[in-house]
Image (cartoon, coloured by chain):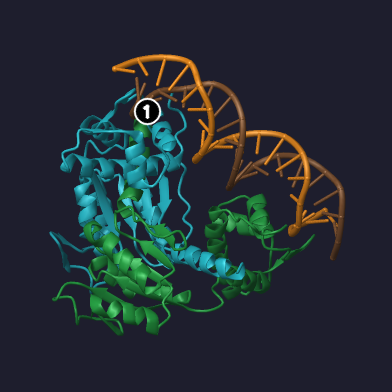
Chain colours: A cyan, B green, C brown, D orange
Amino acid sequence: MKALKIPEATVTRLSVYSRHLAQLIKDGILTVSSGEIAMGVGVSSAQVRKDLAYFGEFGTRGVGYNVQDLYSHIMRILGLNRTWNVVIVGAGKLGSALAVYKGFEDRGFNVVGIMDISADRIGQPLGDLVVEPMENLEQRIHEKNVEIGIVTVPAAAAQEVADIMVRAGVRSLLNFSPRVLKVPDNVILRNVDLSVNLEVLSFNLSFFDRRQ
Amino acid sequence: MKALKIPEATVTRLSVYSRHLAQLIKDGILTVSSGEIAMGVGVSSAQVRKDLAYFGEFGTRGVGYNVQDLYSHIMRILGLNRTWNVVIVGAGKLGSALAVYKGFEDRGFNVVGIMDISADRIGQPLGDLVVEPMENLEQRIHEKNVEIGIVTVPAAAAQEVADIMVRAGVRSLLNFSPRVLKVPDNVILRNVDLSVNLEVLSFNLSFFDRRQ
DNA sequence: GACTGTGAAGCCATTCACAGCT
DNA sequence: AGCTGTGAATGGCTTCACAGTC
């Protein structure tokens, strides 16, 4: 199967599979079937096999997958066989939380800088970082080859911050602000919209009630 | 068009539309076309019309939509014509950030309690809340009619926390832990997986490079 | 017998294109 | 003339079901 267009849903599931496999490795399990993975992460076994099939044949018919082997393959597919440097702009509560979030480090994402515009945040220590002024942003991106930027500023500042990061050469953005950002189409953009997530819950709760 | 099954993507877009409309109201704009909304939020105009058509006919042919009117309709559809009480379990950096996140309050989500298991977090003030011990969780859920729970504990504790909240009567969960949760199927579950989001970026960055 | 890999079928969401209304 | 509402067409993802392999 030739890989040209991979569904985004497949990529997110691969990430979930990889964490499940990491757990199996810890548990000393050597072999796993698509059905067992499926069970563990709440999808169908056909889905697991299809997802993997986009990238090659990793299993053995009648047997299943070698856990360590499959894990290594998926990590490589996800681009996690290396580390990635990340900068965060916005040292409010959320930005600060992400700056020291262990889950990122565990998966090879190093936060190499956190910037803010506000004088009372600049200089504040965060883990082994210190909040820096916005003026340092471009230099830090160049010096550390940063390819991923995280936006945790208020909506009103988000587009400007995105523009600065893009101009400085960041190739992808993770946007936590509740603002639709415009970026050139060679820049990869993902939005994590906290309110939208709650609102989907609220819709479903209400909708369910309406249908009673 | 009769509303039986609404695509989840439609719901998330409605949430985005509603914020865009709120801005138009602030700007004093009275009427808007599907094309203008589409432009503002980065989707197609047909998509906007289809999304709205699931719920009724809100526009006027040849004219467009009344901004205030459409906003009210969407807010009602999303279940945001009321407030929702929310509890957060896990008063680490992320949970604390969410507890005081203005974006929730603005949209009618009131955080009415934040619990933690750790003695040194309990008692800590957070906005006008104080971190409470886990023992208070069930009572708080009952007393405040909490229907939405937010999980911001480490992966190892996430399932247990989810179970407690579900038992106490919460009807929906927003899970920030990197753990696949099992909940009864009358409970609505959404996952916000921070690492997965970065990993999708890393995949796309790597994949793009591979194809150069 | 067990389990993978994969075409084919089925299902769902998006886009097209136009009739219908103002 | 302008814009909505919507059937029809398209495209994409998931599920089915089974041949192929161990």
Q: Nearer the viewer, residue C14 or B142?
A: B142
Chain of the residue displaying label 1: A
**D5 relative position to C19: left or right:** left
Q: Secondary structure at mark 1?
A: loop
Query: Does residue A91 appear in this view?
Result: no
x then y, percent, for residue A174: 37, 53
x then y, percent, for residue A134: 28, 61
**A150 relative position to A143: left or right:** right
The residue drawn where x is 67% and y is 73% is B69
Q: Nearer the viewer, residue A82 or A92?
A: A82
Q: Decide: is A146 above or below A100.
A: above
The residue drawn where x is 38% and y is 63% is B174
Question: Amino acid under label 1?
Answer: Phe
Q: Nearer the viewer, residue B63 or B133?
A: B133
**A125 relative position to A180: left or right:** left
Q: Badge 1: few (under 14), some or many (20 or more) residues near its Cα, within 10 Å?
A: some
Q: Which residue is disc 1 drawn over?
A: A55
Query: Is the N terminus of chain A in the top left, top right, bottom left or bottom right quadrant?
Result: top left
Examine the image and state in which quarter residue A19 appears: top left
Examine the image and state in which quarter residue A206 appears: bottom right
x then y, percent, for residue A54: 41, 29
x then y, percent, for residue B151: 32, 65
Query: Does residue A94 appear in this view?
Result: yes
Q: Please count the marks in the image.
A: 1
Query: Is the C terminus of chain A in the top left, top right, bottom left or bottom right quadrant?
Result: bottom right
The residue drawn where x is 31% and y is 85% is B128
Q: Decide: is A3 above or below A203.
A: above
**A120 relative position to B128: left or right:** left
